[in-house]
Image (tube, rainbow, N blue to C red):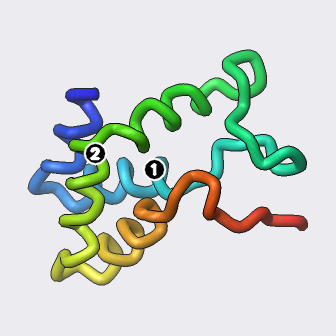
Amino acid sequence: MNEWIALLESKRAADVLSALVFLGGRHMVETERRFVDKKDGLYATLFEETILDANIRALISRHTKSPSRWIREAAALASRGPRDRPIDNR
């Protein structure tokens, strides 16, 4: 968890954006709208543990007020609940 906190606290926008893009993504089985099991997705368990951490949630919230538009928008996406993310039906 400390590595994610370090990325979200970094002075480098690229580090912050990297973390926020992962945390704002979908890591669920789309047809069942549930978190994927470890066997189904390499990053699903990591995502679930990380996004539910109170310190991570606080850092994401802080970034929604960033002077950088890109960081604000990425933080807004990451601040949605894991089950509140639209399914891409392409």
Residue at figure coordinates x 63%, y 54% from the top left: 83
Three-letter code for the amino acid on which mark 1 is drawn: Leu
69 left or right of 46?
left
Distance Cα–Cα, label 1 vs label 2:
10 Å
Quadrant location of residue 42? Answer: top right
42 left or right of 80?
right
Q: Secondary structure at mark 1?
A: helix
Numbered label attached to residue 70: none
83 left or right of 22?
right
Three-letter code for the amino acid on which mark 2 is drawn: Ile
Q: Position of residue 72 (x, y in %)?
A: 31, 76
Q: Quadrant of the C terminus?
A: bottom right
Q: Are marks 1 and 2 in contact (CB under 8 Å)?
A: yes
Q: Secondary structure at mark 2?
A: helix
Residue at figure coordinates x 21%, y 54% from the top left: 59
- The residue beneath circle 1 is 23
- The residue beneath circle 2 is 56
Residue at figure coordinates x 41%, y 63% from the top left: 79
Earlier along the polypeptide chain: callout 1 or callout 2? Answer: 1
Of all residues shown, which one is farthest toward the top?
A: 39
**Crowding near the residue tagged with mark 1, few <14, some 14–19, many ≥20 C-alpha atoms within 10 Å:** many
79 left or right of 11?
right
Q: Position of residue 20 (x, y in %)?
A: 38, 56
Q: Position of residue 38 (x, y in %)?
A: 67, 19
